[in-house]
Image (cartoon, rainbow, N blue to C red):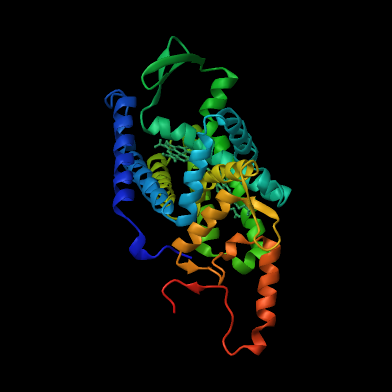
Amino acid sequence: MNVRTSQINYLNPTLIGLAASMLLTALVVIGSRNLEHFDSALFGYTVASVVAFGAIFFRYALWLQRPATRVYFKRGIQLFFQRRKFAANTVDSSKTLAKNLVGQRFIFKRGTMRWLMHFLIMWGCLSAAAVTFPLVFGWVHFNLEGEMGYRTYLFGFPLTVLNGRSVMAWIVFHALDFSALMVIAGCAIAIQRRLRDRGAIAVQQFLLDFVPHLLLIAISVSGLMLTASSLWFDGYMYSFIALSHQAVVIMTIFFLPFGKFFHIIQRPASVGVELYQSRSKEMEQAACPRCDTKFAAQMWVDDLKGVVTELGFDYTLEDGTMLQDYCPRCKRIMRGLAYSGLPNKAEPVFYGTRAGEE
Ligand code: HEM
Ligand code: HEM
């Protein structure tokens, strides 16, 4: 259920979004050494990134206003910074990150091809982003040193020298081409599944399930065409292809906060949920008022009661307890008993009423 529109506060998310955009602008100026290493031809990419960065923070702040999300977020942070458990929490959260974010184990359970599809798309995009954003913002640049040495500069600070003829240099300079091939292969697997899998066909929507892949394919193909143009066709149509690449990249960046791609930012928040779940086993447990079974942490039950009340539901029973106080088994039994009494009653029995209803 959505939070009622009247409860949504747009002011704070707007301020947070503006602050994020300003921070990124400042980092671009500082990181490129007062725009000395900033390529003005890439201004369009930078403006789009700054706007989208703010929009991502705006959307995230709005999302955190949902009662359940807010509770999980607050508890995740609170539990993580518990002084006595900080080390254990860091280990647990790193494990979750490695398993679910890096290895994507939860998708593996759905099938090897699905896992491969997502692995290729995700790591293709992340590696491309790791190369392009720092270059576009002027945070990284290369200077020719000697005959074939390229010195890398990060935020204006000199790093190692790369031999231009080495295998390493070839890999670095073609990193975007590898990313593009990974993304195209991953999207091909995803589209093939979406065209064949009956379960997927029944529920998928064009904007949500095809547009993201089409955008990624358009970016990757135009990127590969840039390489082909400069390597084999003496730069034929280079500026037109570069403009097309820029156009689809900007469209995708703007799509980030409001479409399917928002899960990239949303999903990692599950680390806090997993932490809450694992720490809740060590907390004081709530006992079911009907069978006395300890079934969940008291804190979790209280949080749940707070969330349902905030959402406008009132599950208070005649004896003053709330439906959420009962264990799942007793809830099912109580519901069954209530239904079995229905035919004898004029009025249907319901566990509670929506707030504001008589
Ligand atoms: C750059 C990063 C990422 C990109 C570009 C990306 C892209 C995508 C795309 C295009 C799909 C749709 C695939 C389909 O057609 O079914 C998808 C699905 C999905 N993504 Fe991501 N994703 C990224 C990161 C993440 C992260 C960090 C998580 C979670 C930790 C995640 C979780 C998922 C899940 C659960 C699905 C559904 C997979 C399935 O159908 O089995 N993604 N992602
Ligand atoms: C899925 C993500 C992406 C892939 C696979 C990709 C791929 C490519 C490839 C293969 C090239 C040609 C490289 C070369 O010939 O040396 C390229 C060029 C470029 N890409 Fe991307 N790219 C992606 C995302 C982005 C993003 C997010 C940006 C900006 C923030 C970006 C900005 C650029 C720029 C500025 C160039 C050089 C084009 C020019 O000369 O004007 N790309 N990309």
Q: Where 332 sits versus 231, above or below? A: below
Give the quarter of the figure containing the C terminus: bottom left
Taking the spot 30% from the left edge, 40% from the top edge, the residue there is 19
Q: Where 343 sits versus 87, above or below? A: below
Q: Where 358 sits versus 227, above or below? A: below
Q: Is residue 272 visible?
A: yes
Q: Whole-percent x and y of residue 337?
A: 69, 76
Q: Nearer the viewer, residue 208 or 345?
A: 345
Q: Whole-percent x and y of residue 46?
A: 34, 39
Outermost residue on the front side: it is 319
Q: Nearer the viewer, residue 77 or 353?
A: 353
Taking the spot 69% from the left edge, 57% from the top edge, the residue there is 292
Q: Is residue 221 visible?
A: no
Report how many numbered discs are placed on residues in the image. Answer: 0
Q: Is residue 5 left or right of residue 311?
A: left
Taking the spot 73% from the left edge, 47% from the top edge, the residue there is 112
